Amino acid sequence: MKPFILILFFFLLTSTSWACDVCNLYEFRPVDAKNFVGIFYRHSSFQGYQDLSLERPSISTSGAVAAKNKSKGSAGANRRHVPDGSEKYQVWPSEKDYEHYQTWEFRANFRIKNRINVQAVLPYRVIDIYYQSVFEFPQPVRDSLTTLSGFGDALVTADYMLYGQTGKLRHIWRPGLGVKLPTGSYKITAPNGERYDGEIQPGTSAWGFLLKGTYTLVWDNRFGVDNSISHQFFTNGTNDYEFGDQFNAASSLFYVWRKGNWQLIPRGGAYVEAADRSKENGARIKTTGGHTLFGTAGADAVFKKVTLTASCFQPLADRLNTPQQINNAVRYQVGAFYSF
């Protein structure tokens, strides 16, 4: 293994800026290790609102709840996830609300003739959504915790490697493509038999396509900067839910410290992600989409062919499309890899 390990901070969708973590690409990207296998764990949190104002649910004289979540002609002006799958489910925001997205990933990377790099990712996801105040006729106001789990969509990416050298400066360009396959679970139902919302299913039921590019500059095999951009878009899923296009950009500085068979590579930088509004049944969902700026920090510890990696993402500016969307919170990720 060469004396530096780098991470590409997406593309992907991620998590996105609208309380969904199925769309981002967290790509572990060693520059020189041709083949490796590894396990990765990611955790994304969402909590708090820019605006807590939301009308309380009302009950008509016929006893039916005025359900704004699924009103016709609108993709949800006050839309929230519907954890129990009911169209007569109403939730209004509280500072205690949260959404947690956990992902375990198996990753395999292969280099073909030192020019083409192929990586495959198989995720398993656990989603926890908690609301402090919900109402569903005829039940009284209560809290609600919903947990969904299942395999997410498999992902395959391919990069073409280009190298250059200017004195002690080494240049690495990696234009690439990716495809996300609709292999994940997307038919999970609530106890009442109704299907959960498409935006909180482990899988998307849709094809996803990724365009990405990375430029890495290394000086004297010690200092470096890593820059990447990506754009991801989705087809309409079989559940009639279409995720909005995703755009991500990241830049990070790193330093390689060596002692014997050990290497320690601290890094820090910034990451931006943006998402268009999603669509359900052809109508745009008002309370989706936006953009977020994160500060990033992390490190890799390398011993011979084994690498341990950890990163943290702290939101610095959250600009969602509506003030009633739940905000991005801290994210972190850890992984262990073996090169061969």
Image (cartoon, helix red, strand yellow):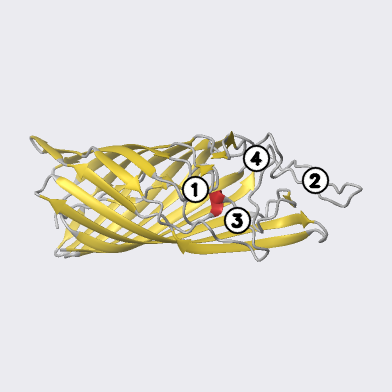
**Residue, disc 2:** 66
In 3D space, how far apart are the residues under numbered discs 2 and 4 (Cα atoms)? 24 Å
Q: Residues within 10 Å of mark 1 (few under 14, many from 20)?
A: some
Front residue of 304/232: it is 232
In 3D space, how far apart are the residues under numbered discs 1 and 4 (Cα atoms)? 33 Å
In 3D space, how far apart are the residues under numbered discs 2 and 1 (Cα atoms)? 28 Å
Q: Quadrant of residue 42?
A: bottom left
Residues at badges 1 and 4 in contact (C-beta under 8 Å)?
A: no
In 3D space, how far apart are the residues under numbered discs 2 and 3 (Cα atoms)? 19 Å
Q: Quadrant of residue 246?
A: top left
Residues at badges 2 and 4 in contact (C-beta under 8 Å)?
A: no
- Specify the label residue 50 is tagged with: 4
Q: Residue at image x 16%, y 41%?
A: 161
Q: Secondary structure at mark 2?
A: loop
**Residue, disc 1:** 238
What is the x, y in percent for residue 279?
Answer: 55, 38
What is the x, y in percent for residue 306?
Answer: 22, 65
- Of the residues shown, which amino acid type is indicated by label 2? Ala
**Residue, disc 3:** 196
